[in-house]
């Protein structure tokens, strides 16, 4: 049971990834029966620009209704950060014809669920419901798309602002290593870069958001032409189309949304940082700028991450956790967003091994990998879990919905999952070797997180610059 | 907008003929009308076969053919509470991790490589009252993966160097856990409720991990992984006949042995008068609350009434606790309550993370809601209906994947519930009355004996907590022992 609703999905939350990796072997399958890589769907646009995707699956008498708005923290301005996510909370406070509380009653209260999430690129909202509650779910979503501002006032905004500040305290400030993603975003990009601030925003900016700021944000980004709706599960498409027309059809089209032009991350010189946290065990993080998920190198970088860490025979895991045992855990990830990406390595040391020693060991493994590239066997293992992972994703209506919408929003094609799958399968050993030498030799950021008063525990401590973060206790 | 629309309709009515009004009404959608639900979908509970293998294990097979997936799980009755001694807490989990470290014929690396090529992984763990080994694979890789699982379960060599590596990792994890206020809060809460002598109050510590020897691990594996206490569950794209043949072949070497354990627990320590236990966490941005006391076991006849009770109190977003402390007061990102049922008296707990500055105010509200549910704020018809609807209509979600179906069926056997449990579920929930809910609330939420565990910045919260006058304050350390000033 969880009430951690309206959560923020920070793209650069490596701790969660690291723990996930440590709990299970990666899902990997060698024979590719392309038969199983199919999702039947149909898609169309309403006259106001709303993209609709329908996919029937009658296995379980439930339906997922999922809407993505193509707006995230990167659409914010410096000084007004945290807006997209604050807004996500406001979307659950009732709208023109839906009193506060009814949304939960018609979802959770009938045996279903609802939530939303925000990242750098997009904001999503969903309802999972028994299939006989589809019409009311569509009504709920259409009402907040069309009539949210009718009922929005400063009191409501303030209430959600307090809750978001608590979310920030719980997920970042009161969390060991919780500030790492913010430190990296700020160090990787110039101050005006749309990926330089955290999705949840700063306490100061959250306090500063005015009612008018929020309303203007809604008018621009929460229009049907900036949204994609998917309905997946046990329903009748003909009936669903009629309801979608009924509830969404007359909502007015909004202005065309300008997509920010975003430069890739690039460091003129490497940086070495040290951050003192309320922790007892230090950690080492290394991050290189790479590319976003719309660029083809993302596929080879992702495959490379599975070769470097995860199962016990992965290169970094084997060298640091198994052979020398200087690390307790290690992870390597390609974290990519729509416009930018980073490759990150994170290491939790065993006692008696300094971060300096660990950085040297990581570099040694990576140098060797750059010079020799992956073996055929490594490449095959890295791709073997794709099929199972994909099929398991289809077990959930919401998983399928997200898969389809992701394609529609970022590639203009709900069926993009199939291209995505094929492109991963097509990655060659030469591709992986090339991206290793192209990206892992670049200028990078090395961050040591150390216990309070123990800056000397940082990797190459004398060369490291201290990072100070405003303590996020915030004021009320 | 709503009123504007009505005014427009009225103006139009004045100038057009009556005949046109009907047509106009059809075009104008009344958005204030809540669309009614369609007919309730027929509940489809999966069917399964239940047979006994020659070695004594129970075999359950449930077919599900939509996707080419198979879930395989062996569940063992009894867990660390039954099979570990107090001084060797952690040996169960350590053993579960050691299974993949090498067998008579394969190294740990070879086992890992083979699983990677099959595209799956084997999960292995032992909890307080049950343990399991299992995987989800594509249908075509089911038998090959099962062969590896059987090899790990039956032929592991438990290499000494692997034990040292895992011990090192576990010690780092235990150190890191001390920095996690949420983890500290949960551990201290259990210790206060159950004490050192009850397994529910014990946990893996640095001392117990350091005491584990390879012999302990070998002995645990031998005593624990026995078919006499095992339930083998296969769910997915496979027929019962094929599943049985595959299991009999794959687990052929698993000889008959082992019994079902008994779940006798020592007597609970005597309940203490309500008290605030404060763990100092200097600089903490939030105070982590755990409020509660030992509750009933899963086999309580009050189960359904308690489920309705908890749904109203703190099981959902709009439950009383979250509606008040998060949505109305803004003190938290989320608070909740739960009864953690087991074979023994699992705890009732209400809690969440609260902004430091509102720690005292939040305690007042927590207590207000607990007093409310035991009688001061009567339960409404609407609360009863919503709680029951959500429980009953949420049932299909428990059958939404091969692993969900596997858990749904296996848990009936583990908890000794009847095979028609899910068919009777709606009837049993529907039968709960407001009087039942009030009765169980009074019985199980004993306000005079609550343990109120708060992990937070003492310098910021202690004075305020004292001023509430709700209960005396005792300072304790992160191990749950009395702390000096």
Image (spheres, coloured by chain):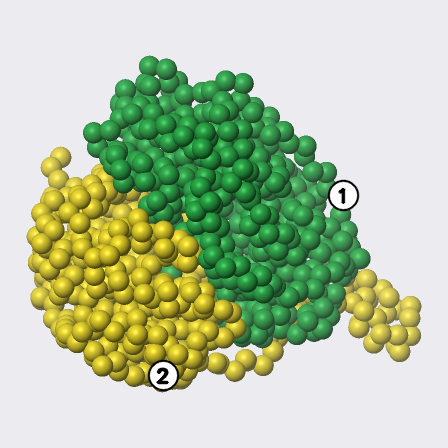
Chain colours: A green, B yellow
| Residue B344 horizontal/vertical position (percent) | 18, 68
Locate residue A339: give its quadrant. Answer: top right
Q: How crowded is mark 2: few (under 14 residues within 10 Å), some or many (20 or more)?
A: few
* Visible residue check, residue A273: yes
| Residue B394 horizontal/vertical position (percent) | 46, 72
The residue to which callout 2 is attached is B49
Locate residue B260: give its quadrant. Answer: bottom left
Count of numbered labels shown in the rendering: 2
Q: Which of B125 and B456 is in front in this view?
A: B125
Q: In the drawing, does residue A186 fall left or right of residue B235?
A: right
Q: Residue A384 carries which label?
A: none
The residue to which callout 1 is attached is A256
| Residue B388 horizontal/vertical position (percent) | 43, 75
Residue shown at 51% from the left, 24% from the top: A442
- Badge 2 marks a residue whose secondary structure is strand
Q: Which chain carries label 1?
A: A
Locate residue A350: give its quadrant. Answer: top left
Q: Which chain carries label 2?
A: B
| Residue B355 horizontal/vertical position (percent) | 37, 42
* Visible residue check, residue A148: no
Work out whether A369 lies above or below B221. above
Work out whether A274 lies above or below B142. above
Q: In the drawing, does residue A301 fall left or right of residue B135?
A: right
The N terminus of chain B, quarter of image: bottom right
- Badge 1 marks a residue whose secondary structure is loop
Check the image and name the residue furthest to the top: A462
Residue shown at 33% from the left, 45% from the top: A312
Residue shown at 77% from the left, 44% from the top: A255
Residue shown at 45% from the left, 25% from the top: A445
Measure the C-alpha gap from mark 2 to mark 1.
58 Å
Q: Residues within 10 Å of mark 1 (few under 14, many from 20)?
A: few
């Amino acid at each position: 049971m969880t009430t951690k609703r309206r959560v923020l999905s920070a793209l650069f939350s490596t701790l969660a990834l690291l723990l996930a990796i440590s709990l299970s072997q990666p899902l990997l399958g060698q024979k590719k029966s392309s038969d199983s890589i199919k999702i039947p769907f149909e898609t169309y646009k309403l006259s106001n620009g709303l993209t609709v995707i329908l996919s029937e699956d009658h296995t379980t008498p439930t339906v997922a209704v999922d809407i993505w708005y193509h707006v995230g923290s990167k659409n914010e301005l410096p000084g007004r950060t945290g807006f997209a996510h604050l807004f996500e909370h406001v979307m659950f406070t009732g709208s023109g014809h839906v009193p506060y509380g009814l949304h939960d009653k018609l979802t959770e209260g009938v045996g279903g669920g609802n939530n939303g999430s925000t990242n750098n690129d997009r904001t999503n909202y969903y309802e999972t419901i028994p299939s006989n509650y589809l019409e009311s779910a569509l009504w709920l979503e259409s009402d907040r798309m069309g009539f949210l501002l009718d009922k929005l006032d400063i009191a409501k905004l303030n209430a959600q602002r307090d809750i978001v500040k608590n979310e920030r305290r719980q997920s970042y400030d009161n969390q060991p290593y919780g500030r790492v993603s913010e430190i990296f975003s700020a160090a990787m990009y110039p101050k005006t870069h749309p990926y330089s601030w955290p999705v949840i925003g700063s306490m100061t900016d959250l306090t500063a958001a005015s009612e008018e700021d929020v309303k203007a944000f809604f008018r621009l980004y929460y229009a049907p032409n900036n949204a994609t709706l998917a309905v997946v599960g046990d329903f009748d498409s003909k009936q669903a189309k009629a309801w979608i027309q009924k509830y969404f059809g007359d909502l007015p089209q909004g202005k065309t949304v300008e997509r920010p032009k975003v430069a890739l991350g690039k460091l003129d010189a490497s940086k070495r940082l040290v951050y003192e946290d309320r922790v007892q065990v230090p950690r080492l993080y290394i991050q290189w700028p790479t590319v976003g998920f719309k660029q083809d190198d993302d596929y080879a970088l992702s495959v490379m991450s599975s070769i470097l860490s995860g199962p016990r025979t992965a290169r970094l895991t084997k060298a640091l956790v198994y052979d020398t045992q200087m690390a307790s855990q290690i992870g390597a990830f390609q974290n990519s967003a729509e416009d930018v990406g980073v490759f990150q390595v994170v290491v939790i040391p065993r006692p008696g091994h300094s971060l300096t020693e660990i950085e040297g060991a990581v570099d040694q493994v990576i140098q060797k990998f750059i010079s020799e590239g992956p073996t055929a066997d490594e490449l095959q293992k890295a791709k073997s879990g794709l099929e199972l992972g994909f099929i398991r994703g289809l077990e959930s209506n919401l998983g399928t919905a997200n898969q389809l919408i992701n394609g529609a929003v970022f590639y203009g094609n709900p069926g993009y999952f199939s291209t995505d799958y094929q492109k991963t399968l097509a990655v060659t050993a030469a591709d992986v070797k090339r991206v290793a030498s192209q990206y892992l030799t670049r200028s990078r950021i090395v961050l040591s997180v150390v216990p309070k008063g123990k800056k000397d525990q940082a990797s190459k401590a004398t060369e490291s610059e201290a990072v100070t973060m405003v303590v996020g206790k915030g004021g009320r | 907008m709503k009123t504007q629309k009505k005014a427009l309709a009225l103006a139009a009515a004045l100038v057009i003929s009556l005949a046109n009004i009907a047509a106009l009404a059809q075009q104008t959608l009344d958005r204030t009308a809540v669309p009614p639900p369609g007919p309730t979908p027929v509940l489809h509970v999966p069917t399964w076969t239940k047979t006994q293998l020659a070695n004594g294990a129970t075999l359950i097979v449930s077919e599900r053919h939509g996707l080419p997936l198979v879930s395989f799980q062996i569940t063992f009755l009894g867990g660390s509470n039954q099979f570990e001694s107090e001084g060797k807490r952690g040996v169960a989990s350590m053993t579960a991790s050691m299974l993949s470290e090498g067998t008579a014929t394969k190294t740990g690396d070879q086992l890992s490589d083979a699983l990677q090529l099959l595209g799956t992984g084997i999960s292995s763990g032992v909890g307080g009252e049950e343990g399991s080994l299992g995987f989800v694979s594509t249908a075509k890789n089911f038998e090959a993966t099962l062969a590896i699982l059987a090899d790990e379960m039956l032929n592991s060599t438990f290499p000494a160097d692997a034990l040292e590596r895992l011990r090192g990792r576990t010690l780092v994890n235990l150190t890191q856990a001390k920095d996690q206020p949420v983890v500290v809060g949960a551990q201290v809460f259990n210790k206060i409720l159950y004490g050192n002598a009850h397994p529910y109050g014990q946990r893996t510590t640095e001392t117990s991990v350091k005491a584990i020897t390879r012999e302990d691990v070998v002995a645990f594996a031998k005593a624990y992984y026995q078919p006499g206490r095992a339930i083998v569950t296969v769910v997915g794209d496979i027929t019962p006949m094929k599943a049985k043949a595959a299991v009999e072949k794959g687990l052929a070497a698993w000889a008959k042995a082992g019994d079902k354990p008994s779940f006798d627990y020592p007597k609970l320590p005597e309940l203490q008068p309500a008290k605030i236990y404060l763990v100092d966490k200097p600089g903490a941005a939030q105070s982590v609350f755990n409020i509660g006391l030992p509750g009933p076991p899963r086999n309580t006849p009050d189960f359904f009434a308690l489920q309705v009770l908890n749904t109203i109190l703190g099981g959902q977003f709009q439950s009383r606790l979250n509606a008040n402390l998060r949505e109305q007061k803004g003190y938290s990102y989320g608070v909740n309550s739960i009864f953690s049922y087991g074979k023994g008296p699992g705890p009732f707990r209400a809690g969440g993370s609260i902004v430091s500055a509102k720690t005292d105010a939040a305690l007042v509200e927590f207590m207000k809601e607990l007093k409310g549910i035991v009688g001061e704020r009567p339960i409404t018809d609407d609360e009863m209906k919503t709680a029951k609807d959500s429980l009953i209509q949420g049932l299909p979600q428990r059958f939404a994947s091969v692993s969900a179906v596997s858990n749904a069926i296996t848990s009936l056997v583990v908890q000794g519930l009847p095979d028609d449990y899910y068919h009777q579920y709606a009837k049993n929930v529907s039968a709960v009355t407001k009087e039942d809910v009030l009765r169980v609330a009074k019985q199980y939420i004993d306000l005079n004996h609550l343990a109120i565990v708060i992990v937070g910045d003492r310098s910021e919260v202690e004075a305020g907590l004292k001023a509430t006058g709700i209960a005396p304050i005792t300072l304790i350390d992160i191990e749950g022992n009395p702390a000096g000033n």
